[in-house]
Amino acid sequence: MDAALIASECVDTRVRGEKAGIMCKLDLEKAYDHVNWGFLLNILRQMGFGDKWLKWIGFCIKTVRFSIHPVGFFPSEKGLRQGDPLSPFLFILVMEGLNSMLRIATQNRWIRGFEVSSRAGVSMEICQLLYVDDTVIFCEAKEDQIRYIRVILVILEAVSSLRVNWRKSSLFPIKEVAQMQRLANILGCKIEQFPTTYLGMPLGSNHKELLIWDGIIQRSEKKLAIWKTQYLSLGGRQTLINAVLDSLPTYVMSLFPLPAKVLEKLDKLRRDFLWFGNKERKGYYLVNWETVQLPKLSGGLGVRNLRIHNECLLMKWLWRYVEEEHALWREVIHHKYGQDSQWCTNEVTIPYGVSTWKTIRSFWTKLAGNIKLRIGNGAKILFWKDVWLRVGKMVEIYLSGDISMNRVAQLLHVINEFNGFAARPDTISWVYSEDGRFTVNKLYKKEMVTQQGLRLARWKYIWTSQAPTKIKCFVWLVAKRACLTQEVLQRKGVQLVPRLTGNSWTMPEHTVDLLSYWIRRGDSKSQKKWWRIIPTCIRNDDYCSFLILHINDTYISTIFVKVPQTKELSEMVMKLPPANGIPQHFGSLLKECNPATLLSSG
């Protein structure tokens, strides 16, 4: 992820500049299988690892045996086992040999990488990005630099047995490059144009381009095509959406903002699959999509809000900018955009391009309102501009010309509360976490509460029950009064007159009619388990409407509230006339109104 951001910033800098450049994207042929053991152990020795450690590593890689059925087991002479947790770390150390050779070439000015600089004139040079076997080299569009790259890669092959697959490697020109074909022939690779991909991330395309998201949409449609061949309940479809479809765009959303058209397309795919499944003919969306995206304990199905999740993922970069002071990606961002304070870069004023940092930086104001500065030695905190007091910025409070007695008293109170400096450095903490650590999940929950508002319903009694998921989803629909009864269909504009056709029994008029079957057989052992799952206030809504205040979400908030066990209430319910064919012995059901009893069996 960090390397993808660095590559994007380097390409963006060269695109905005005047000089042409070349990006060389290398493909190592069967990288893990060709590693020379002697070269690996020599790298470890040069890095200061002791003899005992070298013996351990040598034993791990040299005792490998492979089996082919007709031949039996046979030993290996080189390579690292793919799938071994140790292999990626060892391969990174092997690639340190290439990294060292390129660094020496850069220091001697044999190869000139891409410079990343700000208006203040501070710059740094990036020549190579290596992440396991994904290698990218930046250089100027000059023949001598391409030849140096060729020599370095030939030396690497000789000492480590790592061979570059030139047929799969590519050169990407930036701006107009003369004799591009001649440069490609030196390496023996092909010429390609931006945009491309690096580490699974788009590279070289405008961050608002819809082309970036075509792969995500296609993978989602491919998954749906498989699922639509199966008969799945609402609960099954909801589980697949939460587990698979919500996660597919997460990786790309960690660096790129989600365009409105792509968001609309992904939401439509998820929404149609949730409500219609494998039906070719569309029906009704039973519950509003914004409600479906609420957390389960707030009255929704917990389907992820991709827009809010995308913002949370992008804001994580701002938190990391503060925490990871010595990371390479942070140094690149710092040198390119400058620093407004110790906590963030300058506001980006240049037009949008290949880079995504302008979008990421735009969320700083929102993030800053949720963090608290912890004063240490005071080296990082700006006295006037930073919010190091709970009353706000000093520049906004005490330089406004208001010298009232209240302000003076407030200032004296703040001075008395200040405990002085400490030996530790200044830090930040996340105000919505007990340990002060930022996580995307905590920010997402906070944003959902902020934008959607708190709900008072005790939905946990549905989702924590032992009932199957499809039953929980049905009870959720009932609690939302979303089942397609005559009442709901009429609200949706469908006019039905079933009594004229003599089929009034086939279409229940209200939600409570759907539950009358369970009410009649509530004492049956076969129905008792399901009867107890049904929320109490849904069952007796027609009889006890005088107990419920229909204001905003008050009805929903009282679904799982325990009905008082009073003699007066029982007598009042017993005196109510029957409705919709429900027997008058409904008062006996008040004994089951305790939520703990409702969920005791499931």
Image (spheres, rainbow, N blue to C red):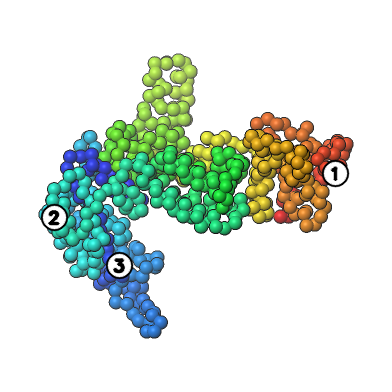
Q: Is residue 62 above or below residue 9?
A: below
Structural crowding at the residue carrying mark 3, measured as other residues with C-alpha within 10 Å and reported as few (<14), some (14–19) or many (≥20): some
Q: Residue furthest left?
A: 144
Mark pair 1, 2: CA separation: 91 Å
Contact (Cβ within 8 Å) of mark 1 with mark 3: no
Q: In the image, is 327 to the left or to the right of 285?
A: left
Q: Position of residue 296 (x, y in %)?
A: 60, 45
Q: In this orientation, which residue lies closer to the viewer: 184 or 401?
A: 184
Q: Mark 2 sits on what residue?
A: 182
Q: Which residue is painted at 25% across and 45% down in the image?
A: 11
Kindly state the secondary structure of the residue where label 1 is placed: loop
Amino acid residing under circle 3:
Lys
Kindly state the secondary structure of the residue where label 3 is placed: loop
Residue 548 quadrant: top right
Structural crowding at the residue carrying mark 2, measured as other residues with C-alpha within 10 Å and reported as few (<14), some (14–19) or many (≥20): few
Amino acid residing under circle 1:
Pro
Q: Which residue is painted at 78% across and 48% down in the image?
A: 517
Q: Position of residue 562 (x, y in %)?
A: 75, 41
Query: Looking at the figure, which quarter contains the C terminus?
Result: bottom right
Q: In the image, is 410 to the left or to the right of 283?
A: left
Q: Mark 1 sits on what residue?
A: 583
Q: In this orientation, which residue lies closer to the viewer: 541 or 374?
A: 541
Q: Mark 3 sits on what residue?
A: 30
User: Which one is earlier in the sequence, the residue at label 1 or at label 3?
Assistant: 3
Kindly state the secondary structure of the residue where label 2 is placed: helix
In this rendering, does residue 382 appear at all? Answer: yes
In front: mark 1 or mark 3?
1
In this rendering, does residue 43 appear at all? Answer: no
User: Which one is earlier in the sequence, the residue at label 2 or at label 3?
Assistant: 3
Q: Position of residue 94 (x, y in %)?
A: 27, 64
Structural crowding at the residue carrying mark 1, measured as other residues with C-alpha within 10 Å and reported as few (<14), some (14–19) or many (≥20): some
